[in-house]
Each structure stands twice: as C-alpha cells, then as structure tokens.
Amino acid sequence: MIYEKEREQVAAFMRRLYRQFLTTTSGGNISCRLPDGNIAVTASQSDKANQQAATVGVVTPDGKSLTPELKLSIETGLHLAIYRVRPDIGAIVHAHPVTATFFTAADEPINMHLTAEAYAVVGETVRIPYALMGTPELAALAAEKMRDCDCGLMDNHGVITVGKTLLSAFDKMELLECAAKQTLMACSLKAHSLTPAQLLELDRFVGRK
C-alpha cells in the first residue's frame, strides 16, 4: 500500500475526531500533505468511527486520484484549494462539532478571548460564506478566507481548521468547540474577556506579532 504510514495517521485522527464527538458517522474529512507533495485525504461514504489506512485516498495537488479504488471525499477540492494558498500548512481538518457548527448558523461570533489557551492556539476565526458543499465555489471561498487564518466557520455547514501537523489542526478543532461551549455559557453568566494588552502579549508569546 502506498503511503501506508501517513494514511494510517489520517485514519487515526478521524477515529479520534469521531470519539470526541466532533463529527458524525458520515460527516467531515481530514487530509495531510505527504512528503512528495501529494495529499492523503479521507474517502467518501466510509464510517468515520472505523477509518483505516485503506479507507484514506491519495491525490496529486492537481486532483488526480492515485487510489482509484476509493471514492474521494466531495470536499477534496476544498482541501486542495487551501493547500495551494497555504504552503505553510501540512494538515486540514473539516468537521461538524455541534456547538461550533451552531455558531455557523448564528449571527454572533464565537468568543475566542475567554481563555488564553484558545486564543494562543487558535487565534481569531473567519466566516466563510455559504456555498453548496463539494462545489468549486465553496473551495474558492474557503481558500480565499483561509489565507491568513487557521480556523474558518463555514456558514450553515461546519468548521475547518489547518495546522503544520495533523495534531495541530486537530487541537484547534477541539479548542474551538470548547470556546463555542464557553461562549454559550457566558450568555447566562457574567464573564470577562482578555484585555487588548493581554491579547497582544499572547500574540507575541506564540510569534504571531
């Protein structure tokens, strides 16, 4: 099997994503950039709880499938579009965590300023306008909005995070869901956000400024 180690890593993170209630049986997809520039991406119509290396496809940067026995995810084009504009990243996670995805249909943003960890690791989020899933339009919108941001809220759809590694992209997804839950909690309890000076301090701490 080609790229077996890397494909198993993608499968392992998808299983983990499902175990953490960050996606559904049929929803979401994960990819990573391979050492030679090709992309490993989860296939379509496969049980997210039982992903294996053999259920992760491989495509070239221009979209040619190197695993024709698998039906690629309908969002493969979205992943490829983001990789083209983000040569600095090595992995992408797209999922439908319940709370964060609720905010994709709400007019209020997720407050990323409630905890230092969320802001330091995830930073700010960006809204990606709605377009039909699996379309070139959605891929183009996501790529444009994610040029300078590691976390995108896809209107009435789901969430996408990117990172240098699979672990980094997964961590951001998990922390975003935590921040979304905390934002809802803050609606019923008085909460205070980090100050602008504290946010700047964190930006400098993680090297964003």
Image (tube, grey):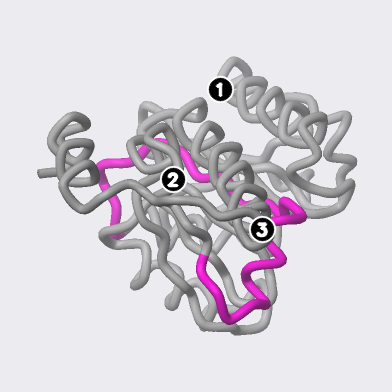
The C terminus is located in which quarter? top left
Q: Earlier in the sequence, mark 2 or mark 3?
A: 2
Q: Examine the rendered structure and indicate whether residue 77 appears above or below residue 132.
A: above
Q: Position of residue 38 (x, y in %)?
A: 44, 40
Cβ atoms at labels 2 and 3 below 8 Å apart? no
**60 left or right, relative to 185:** left
- Amino acid on which the number 2 mark rests in the picture: Val
Residue to which mark 3 is pinned: 184
- Amino acid on which the number 3 mark rests in the picture: Leu
Residue to which mark 1 is pinned: 6
Q: Examine the rendered structure and indicate whether residue 105 appears above or below residue 27.
A: below
Which residues fall within the magenta stretch?
85-109
Q: Where is residue 82 in the image (x, y as percent from the top left)?
A: 40, 59
Q: Examine the rendered structure and indicate whether residue 101 appears above or below residue 168.
A: below
- Label 1 sits on a secondary structure element that is helix
| Location of residue 151 by image quarter | bottom left
Cβ atoms at labels 1 and 3 below 8 Å apart? no
| Location of residue 47 by image quarter | top right
Q: Of tags 1 and 2, which is closer to the observer?
A: 2
Figure label count: 3
Residue to which mark 2 is pinned: 162
101 falls in the magenta region: yes
Cα–Cα span, label 2 and label 3: 24 Å
Cα–Cα span, label 1 and label 3: 37 Å
**134 left or right, relative to 111:** right
| Location of residue 5 by image quarter | top right
